[in-house]
Image: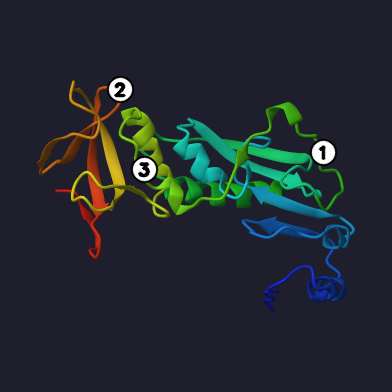
Amino acid sequence: IPVYQPVKLRDGAALALIQELAPELIVVAAYGRILPDEILAAPPKGCINVHSSLLPNYRGAAPIHWAVVNGDKETGVTIMHMAHELDAGDIIAQVRTPIGPDETVGQVHDRLARLGGELLVQADIAAGTARRTPQDPEQVTYAPMLSRALSPIDWNMSAKAIHDKIRGLDPWPATSTDILTGQPVKVFASRLTGQNTAKTPGTVLAAGKEGIDVACGDGAVLRILELQAPGSRRMAAA
């Protein structure tokens, strides 16, 4: 199977290649570039996208991450017709899946990848009968690109909000905190203990075989289970 990997899409080379290949349909999945209008118009059956959210929620680059960071209980995959505006095309089909309270973005990603592949081949594109459901512009939300600026943990947040952030930023850019060593330590896994405390948020309450317990802004206690100190490897917090 020939594999082509154009570095740029707007210099004409990619369009020339697509015109030579003359595909009936283009399918895009987890692709980090915007297709120019000339490419979108090239295949007679159009271009469709496998997007890892329930559009119009979470248009953009990091829909799975933000669904987990925001503590959503459900996400899914959307098969959609591509349009000039990012992730704004008509919806062909959707499938939903729950997000477990302790699932990481990697676990959700792998499940959505499988569901997206299954849903894609069920969408009746070839017959030309695939439905077109316009997105409701009033329901649009966005999932912007991730950056290291998101990493620091604010212990004044609730324990659940911090737990969700840790799950949603694993493995990159990962959350971090300096309350343990005075230097930023990456935090990769946590657990809600169900305990409460009157201590100041960010106070380390205990450190033992179960992990490191920290007071949070809502009075709840979050247990750090996995971390990585500067210059070290990822390891159990104990």
Kind of residue at disc 2: Asp
In what element is the residue under mark 2?
loop
**Which residue lies at the image location 83% right of the left edge and 62% below the top edge?**
39
Disc 1 vs disc 3: Cβ atoms closer than 8 Å?
Answer: no
Left or right of 80? Residue 176 is left
Judge by depth and name the residue closer to the eye, 30 or 204: 204
Kindly tell me whether residue 60 is visible in this rendering: yes
Disc 3 vs disc 2: Cβ atoms closer than 8 Å?
Answer: no
In what element is the residue under mark 1?
loop
Left or right of 87? Residue 167 is left
Q: Which mark is residue 218?
A: 2
N-terminal of the two: label 2 or label 1?
Answer: 1
Where does the image place residue 40, in percent across and percent down from the top left?
83, 58
In this figure, which residue is indicated by the disc labeled 3?
Answer: 166
**Which residue lies at the image location 39% right of the left edge and 50% below the top edge?**
170
Q: Quadrant of the N terminus?
A: bottom right
In what element is the residue under mark 3?
helix
Judge by depth and name the residue closer to the eye, 46 or 152: 152
Q: Nearer the viewer, mark 2 or mark 1?
A: 2
N-terminal of the two: label 1 or label 3?
Answer: 1
Choose top left, top right, bottom left or bottom right for residue 76. top right
Distance between the Cα atoms at labels 3 and 2? 17 Å
Choose top left, top right, bottom left or bottom right for residue 205. top left
Kind of residue at disc 1: Arg
Q: Which mark is residue 132?
A: 1
Distance between the Cα atoms at labels 1 and 3? 37 Å
Kindly tell me whether residue 136 is visible in this rendering: no
**Which residue lies at the image location 81% right of the left edge and 60% below the top edge?**
36
Kind of residue at disc 3: Ile
Choose top left, top right, bottom left or bottom right for residue 10. bottom right
Distance between the Cα atoms at labels 2 and 1? 45 Å
Judge by depth and name the residue closer to the eye, 233 or 96: 233
